[in-house]
Image (spheres, rainbow, N blue to C red):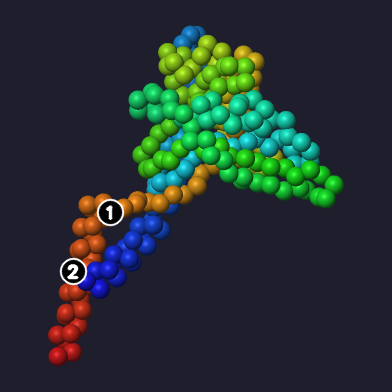
Amino acid sequence: MKRFLQVFSFLLVLSRLSAAFQYEIVELPREKGGYPAVGGNAYYIRVTEGSGSLYIMDKINTLWSANNELLNTVVNVADSSQYGWIDRQTGLAHQADGSQVIVYSQAMNPYNPVVTQTAYKLGDFQAGDEIGVWVTTLQGETGGTIFNKTNPINSSNLVSREYGKTSDQLGNELARLSFDQTNVFFGFHGVEGEPFSGQPLPGMLASFLLGSSALGAISRRKKRARS
C-alpha cells in the first residue's frame, strides 16, 4: 500500500506538471457578402492543454495618464449578464462568471497615476473547449466574436471584428468588436486550474496501478538478487 501511495503521488505530480493550461486564438476566414455576414474575421479561443480560467482584460492605451479605453467605459462589467462566452459547438451564449483579478497595477514614476489593468472572468474551461466571447455595450449593442447574424447573440448593430491586428501599451494582442456606436477592445488572460478534482480518472487510476505493480516487481527482483 505504501508503494502504491508513493507511485500515486509521483504520477499525480507528473500529471500536474504535464497538464499546463494552454490556449490559442483561432481566426476564421473572412465571410464574404452582405447580411448575415459580419465584417472582418471571426475568432475564438481553443483550449489545447490542461484546465483553467479564461478572462477578458482591459486595453491599456497609455502608461502615463488615465486610460479612456478600459472595458468598464464601454461595457457594464460589474454586471456579469452583460458579457460572457459562446459555445462554438452548440452556438449557445452563456453569462460570464464575473469575478475579477488585477493583472497590472503600477505607476511609471511618483508623478504619474497608477495604471491598473483588470481582467474579467468568463468561466472555467478544459482541453478541447472552444469558445467565443460576447458583450453588450452601454448603448445596448450586443455581439460576439463568432457566428454570423443568424445567431441571436449577434445584433444588427455588430459591424466588424478582428483579433491580433493591434496591441496595447503592455504588449497584449487585442481583440476588437465594432458596433454602430462603440468599439470594444480587450485582451485575453488565462489562469491555470486544477487538472482534476476528486477521484482520478479511470485511465489515470489504471496507470497508477500499473506503475505500482511495476515498482513492486522491480523491488521483488532486487530482493531476489540479494538473497
Relative to 192, is 145 above or below? above
Counting residues from the start of the chain, the first of labels 2 and 1 encountered is 1
- Is 128 positioned to the left or the right of 184 in the image? left
The residue to which callout 1 is attached is 199
The quadrant of the picture occupied by the N terminus is bottom left
**Which disc, if any, is residue 57?**
none
Q: Amino acid at mark 2?
A: Ser
Q: Is residue 18 visible?
A: yes
> Would residue 209 be found to the left or right of residue 52 on screen?
left
Residue 203 rendering spot, x and y as whole percentages: 23, 53
Residue 40, horizontal then vertical, whole percent: 54, 21
In the rendered image, the residue lying farthest to the right is 111
Mark-to-mark CA distance, 2 and 1: 20 Å
Up/down of 173 relative to 5, above or below: above
Q: Amino acid at mark 1?
A: Gln
Residues 212 and 49: in front is 212
Which residue is at a point 69% across and 42% down the rendered structure image? 116
Residue drawn at point x = 65 percent, y = 35 percent: 59
Q: Nearer the viewer, residue 106 or 149?
A: 106
Which residue is outermost to the bottom?
227
Disc 1 on helix, strand or loop?
loop
Secondary-structure class at tag 2: helix
* Residue 166 in picture, x, y percent from top left: 63, 33
Question: Which residue is drawn at the image coordinates 44% and 49% (left, top)?
Answer: 193
Quarter of the figure that contains the C terminus = bottom left
Q: Which residue is mark 2?
A: 213
Query: Between 113 and 162, which is closer to the camera in this rendering?
Result: 113
